[in-house]
Amino acid sequence: MDTLIKIAGIAVAGVAVTVLVKKSTPEIGLALSLFIAIALFAAGFDAFRSVKEFLDTFIGQTGITREVVVPIWKTCLIAIVTKITAELCRDAKENAVASGVETAGAILGLYVVLPLFSSLFELMNRLL
């Protein structure tokens, strides 16, 4: 909860400053938006560490192989980075670039989970 309050405070203060700066110098406003996005990501990074530790414990206790969990983890990270990047592009009024980023993120997400699909198909072939 403390982390969420910290993130909300950074976001609200950052947006207020960014809106004021963008009126006179849009380029600096965009750079400030990027800096705020990085700061928010850094503020929530401890949560990522906790999730990774949980997944490592989960893998150890259940016997699930890393080959199953790692693609899911990577896909989640790709989705987060894609979302942040696309929104920053939209903030810069670059909608075509934002759409390109989203498309590339979707393709990379599918690419990362290909080993899972391969394992699934092998399992289905063995069962049939």
Image (tube, rainbow, N blue to C red):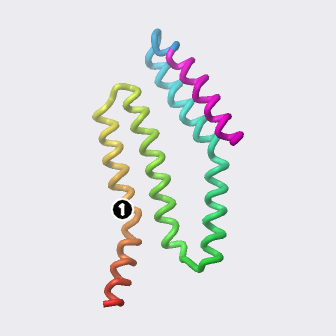
As drawn, 106 above or below 66: above
Q: Which residue is mark 1?
A: 111
Q: Main secondary structure of the magenta part?
A: helix
Q: Is residue 6 magenta?
A: yes
Provide residue 34's location: percent of width, then percent of height: 51, 31
Provide residue 11's location: percent of width, then percent of height: 58, 29
Q: Residue furthest front?
A: 1
- Please state the extent of the stretch shown in magenta in the rendering: 1-19
Tell me what residue is drawn at x 48 percent, y 47 percent: 80
- Quadrant in the rendering for residue 102: top left
Q: Is residue 51 left or right of residue 122?
A: right
Dot 1 amino acid type: Tyr
Tell me what residue is drawn at x 47 percent, y 45 percent: 81
As drawn, 94 above or below 83: above
Number of numbered discs present?
1
Front residue of 127 and 18: 127
Provide residue 13's location: percent of width, then percent of height: 61, 23
Tell me what residue is drawn at x 66 percent, y 69 percent: 57
- Quadrant in the rendering for residue 95: top left
Q: Is residue 127 magenta?
A: no
As drawn, 59 above or below 13: below
Q: Is residue 56 left or right of residue 66?
A: right
Tell me what residue is drawn at x 36 percent, y 62 percent: 111
What secondary structure is marked by label 1?
helix
Provide residue 27's location: percent of width, then percent of height: 45, 19
Quarter of the image where the N terminus is located? top right
- Quadrant in the rendering for residue 49: bottom right
Quarter of the image where the C terminus is located? bottom left
As drawn, 39 above or below 63: above
Q: Residue furthest left?
A: 96
